[in-house]
Image (cartoon, rainbow, N blue to C red):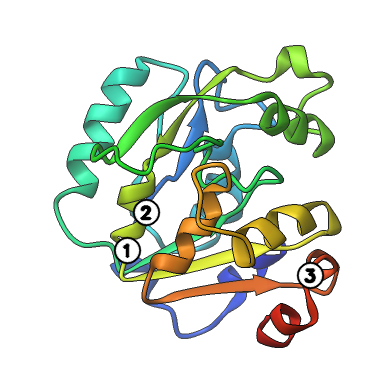
Amino acid sequence: MKFLDSLTAASGIGWRLVEAFHLDEYVGLPMTHPGSFRKMLLEQLIHKTEIVNYHLLDGDGDALAAVRTVSAAVSSAPIDAAIIGIGENAHLAFNDPPADFEAEEPYLIVNLDEACRRQQVGEAWFADISQVPKQAIAMSVRQILKARELIAVMPDLRKAAAVKASVEEVVSQMAPASILRTHANTTIYLDEAPVSLLTADARSIA
């Protein structure tokens, strides 16, 4: 939220020229639910800017139709920048471990693992894990990597293990965000808390 607040408050951005694509959304969750990412994007980004060309994922309707529609749109032109978060289990856009690094489809319907679903409870979007959907629509890892620039934001101490796995450990499907190290133009923004598990050498780079 802080990142989006800063982004939408920045001057000199030609928002009317932006075409925005939604990274992920729960399957079966209405847009009125507090945990809906469509709701968050509309309230925290689109309604605060002059973005008029955007593609949201309707996971509450026909999820397969949503995948086909947005996949066709995102394939029409190269993506300049992808702004992504990383989960407590090092997921990328709900591509939980073991993530599919080979799928060529731009969007996938994925199963959410327990760690991911518990994170959503911990963030207070859901009262308990039984309320968290078990599936989501997610931009595929290969599609994310097609962006010319990747910008990842990883705040909070609870992301420390994911930061270590993503930055220091071997690139692996079990730590999906580690694949970001293979991209030529990735920037990861951290605050002090999530770097706490890194070695001294890695901290000097971070």
- The secondary structure type at the circle numbered 1 is loop
Q: Quadrant of residue 188?
A: bottom right
- The secondary structure type at the circle numbered 3 is helix
Circle 2 crowding by C-alpha within 10 Å: few under 14, some 14–19, many from 20: many
Number of numbered discs overlaid on the protein picture:
3
Image vertical order of residue 77 relative to residue 75, above or below? below
User: Which residue is drawn at the image coordinates 31% and 70% (left, top)?
Assistant: 148
Please give the residue where the numbered disc 1 appears in the rendered image: 147
User: Which residue is drawn at the image coordinates 49% and 38% (left, top)?
Assistant: 95
Specify the amino acid type for callout 2: Ile
Mark nearest the camera among 3 and 2 is 3
Left or right side of 144 for 111: right
Residue 190's spot in the image, x, y percent? 71, 71
Residue 55's spot in the image, x, y percent? 34, 43
User: Which residue is drawn at the image coordinates 70% and 31% (left, top)?
Assistant: 34
In the drawing, what numbered circle is on residue 195?
3
Image vertical order of residue 36 relative to residue 19, above or below? above
Specify the amino acid type for callout 3: Val
Distance from disc 2 to disc 1, alpha carbons, whole Å, reads 6 Å
Q: Mark 1 or mark 3, which is nearer the start of the sequence?
A: 1
Specify the amino acid type for callout 1: Ala
In the drawing, what numbered circle is on residue 144?
2
- The secondary structure type at the circle numbered 2 is helix
Circle 3 crowding by C-alpha within 10 Å: few under 14, some 14–19, many from 20: many
Q: Quadrant of residue 51?
A: bottom left
Q: Quadrant of the N terminus?
A: bottom right
Residue 169's spot in the image, x, y percent? 62, 60
Given residues 151 and 171, the one toward you in this image is: 171
Q: Quadrant of the C terminus?
A: bottom right
Left or right side of 204 for 95: left
